[in-house]
Image: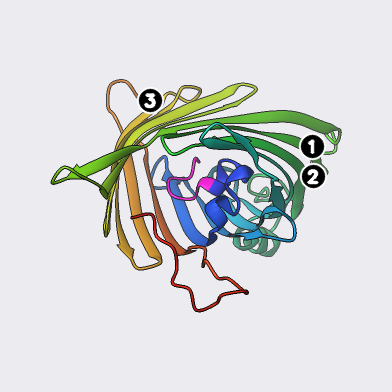
Amino acid sequence: MLPFSNKLLLNPSFAGLNNKTNLWTGIQLFAKSNQVVNNQFSLTYDAYSEKLKGGFAFYFQQGLLGEVNTNTSEFGFSYAGPAIKIGEGKLIPSIGTHFLYATKQWFVFSIDNLLNKKFEPPSPPGEGFGQYNIFKPQFGILYDSPVSQLGISATIHFKNNFADPENQQNNVATGFVFYYAKKTMGLRNELVSQPFQVYPEIIIFYQDDFFMNRASIKVEHIDRTYALFIQNNFTDNYHALGGTFGWRIDNFRINFSSGIGMPVISDEIAFFGEITLGLIIPRINYSEINPWIPQKKLY
């Protein structure tokens, strides 16, 4: 599932961008039917470090694959920088690593142990509790300028399946995420100002035999966020329309996103959504030599 509000989950080069400190948490849901529901909880923290001359980030994610009764827990960290000045923008490389551990859903595992295995075979994904682990090195690069953002990230998956005796060898796969956003500023009374910003966005995800994308148009006012998007999962033939609505309260962000599969062109009318909370702390311009000088402003 592609995140809607947390760009750090798309590309590690967003860590500490513009010297800001960010704390994001959210949960995503994807329902194929009343019986099959997948979810993913995420918590990320990133900030800029003067000593490291770049941004750093920490990740925690926990999910449920309802179709195969599997829980996943994931930890990670990344570093972005130092930035390379190119024209009016900057090029930010990044590197990171994640570790994921998957187990059988604990409730299903407990019920299976209470039943007589001779008459009731264990539920998917099998009898064992531990299923597999994945080591995921990650690389990213982002070009950020006053008018656009362009980035690509790659994650290599080294999967060790230790639950299936017939398939214990390591499986290696690589996933790519392409991100592009165009920034459009606003004008008011013939004066240069930013009462709103418009972001056309394109996200493309590709991994071996899995391909999906999302195109959206996002409008950020002083205290509101609106977005419309179309998302296409070409591998499973899910095509959906949806939107996002959010509040901007000082340094806090609250975003609600949801979408539903389009009939006729989709195999199933799937539903998905996301709720995210964010705390964004901008850089404080503080001078140790002259601490009484007012903070500098653009206008």
Q: CA distance from mark 3 to mark 2?
A: 31 Å
Marker disc for residue 158? 1
Q: Secondary structure at mark 2?
A: loop
In the foreground, 210 or 83: 83
The image shows residue 263 at horizontal and vertical percentages of 27, 27
31 with respect to 167 (left or right): left
Q: Which mark is residue 133?
A: none
Picture quadrant where residue 141 is located = top right
Residue at x 51%, y 35% (from the top left corner): 88
Instruction: Check disc 2: other Cα within 10 Å, few if <14, some if 14-19, many if 20+.
Output: some
Q: Give the main secondary structure, helix, strand or loop, of the magenta stretch.
A: loop
Is 152 contained in the magenta span?
no
Residue 123 located left or right of residue 184: right
Q: Amino acid at mark 2?
A: Ala
Q: Which residue is mark 2?
A: 163
Does 295 appear above or below 54? Answer: below
Nearer the observer: mark 1 or 3; the answer is 1
Q: Earlier in the sequence, mark 2 or mark 1?
A: 1
Q: Can you tell which quarter of the image residue 208 is in?
A: top right
Observer-side mark, 2 or 1, equals 1
From the image, tell me which residue sits under label 3.
Answer: 267
